Amino acid sequence: MLGRRRRLALLAEGRFTPFDAKTAVGVLRYRPEQVVAVIDSTRAGRTAAECVGVGGAIPVVADAPAAAARGADSLAIGIAPQGGGLPEAWRAVVREALGRGWDVLSGLHVFLADDPELAAVAARHGGRILDLRRPPEHRIVAAARATELDAIVVLTVGSDCNVGKMTAALELARALEQRGARAAFVATGQTGIMIADRGVAVDAVVSDFAAGAIEDLVLGAGREAEVVIVEGQGALHHPGYSGVTLSLLAGSCPRAMILCHHAGRAAIRTAEGAPHEIPIPPLEELARAYETAAAWLRPARVVGVALNTLDLGEAAARAACEAAERELALPATDPVRFGAGPLADAVLALKGRTHAPHA
């Protein structure tokens, strides 16, 4: 991961839950072989699976020394809090990790390598601070170059933030590969970068160049892949994060989109202090809005729905998928629970062919 194989401790102090610790959960789901412990003193003694449903028997421990006893050699910040700062209660853990010579992987908006105290500790003990949100040095203005690709570009889009756009993209890539298609995943956030070992945190790029950074990634991925799946961010109707969504639409110029939604969520999750609740529009309205916005540069269709049914029982989850299918007349699935096969088939149908999954 990011230069070498690691034995990670994931820092999620006091917040190791499925929705608070999105980064930790993503790494546990897709890179569990590189995780030896999760740090959360409020849940120490439990397993990752008991807390968030993934990660199996990986233990939750109280502090860095306990993680070191499990063989940890790196620390990864496991949450992405609003505002992007390092919680003050976590500073001592980061300092201790650096004092042990560990690398620290951070996706925070605040760059830890620019913190004089932490940088000095790292320098003394030989560890590195890897700020995954640090934007690329080269700046590119997008020019709809991705429309020239032969590859199908697919963007995951959402009804809100934190509904499973990255997970849907990764599961779609896996399902496409099982069908013999050459698929590439383009990471656009800190968790995706940890999983894919490359990418750009688009929300940290100066707005004039955000679409260009994504365009550059998509063009690179499209040289080798039949299908390029771009990890979505934010939501078109979100008052805080619509800008990053538009940058992804403009930079990737998708031919297809997968609409992602947390089943049962009725209102957009806004920052504290919002004067009123903002309802999530019906899925059909969302799909048309995304298709309209995409068509400003290139016509694109929503070809499937990815539901997050984490809060639902099995029967209710299947019913939610069936309801979404009826509403949009499109395949709908929870890609983690039921597999992304229907979404992969919908994407491959754009090329006029289908693949049977490999045995």
Image (spheres, rainbow, N blue to C red):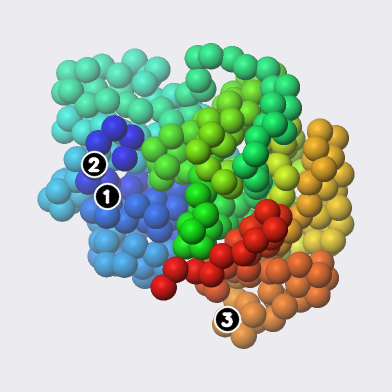
Image coordinates of residue 251 in percent, x first then y, are 68, 31
Task: Specify the label residue 5 is tagged with.
Answer: 2
The crowd level at tag 1 (other Cα within 10 Å; few <14, some 14-19, many 20+) is some
Residue contact between numbered discs 2 and 3, judged by CB atoms under 8 Å: no
Question: Measured along the vertical axis of the image, is residue 8 above or below residue 129?
Answer: below
| Residue 113 can be seen in this image | yes
Foreground residue among 42 and 112? 112
Image coordinates of residue 290 in percent, x first then y, are 80, 47
> Marks 1 and 2, how far apart in space?
7 Å
Task: Specify the label residue 34 is tagged with.
Answer: 1
Give the SS element for disc 2: loop
Mark 3: amino acid: Gly
Horizontal arrangement in the rendering, residue 147 relative to residue 46 (left or right): right
Question: Measured along the vertical axis of the image, is residue 23 above or below residue 223?
Answer: below
Question: Measured along the vertical axis of the image, is residue 347 above or below residue 116?
Answer: below
Labels 2 and 3: the sequence-earlier one: 2
Mark 1: amino acid: Gln
Horizontal arrangement in the rendering, residue 344 relative to residue 174 (left or right): right
Residue contact between numbered discs 1 and 2, judged by CB atoms under 8 Å: yes
Q: How many marks?
A: 3
Labels 1 and 2: the sequence-earlier one: 2
Mark 2: amino acid: Arg
Give the SS element for disc 1: helix
Foreground residue among 347 and 315? 347
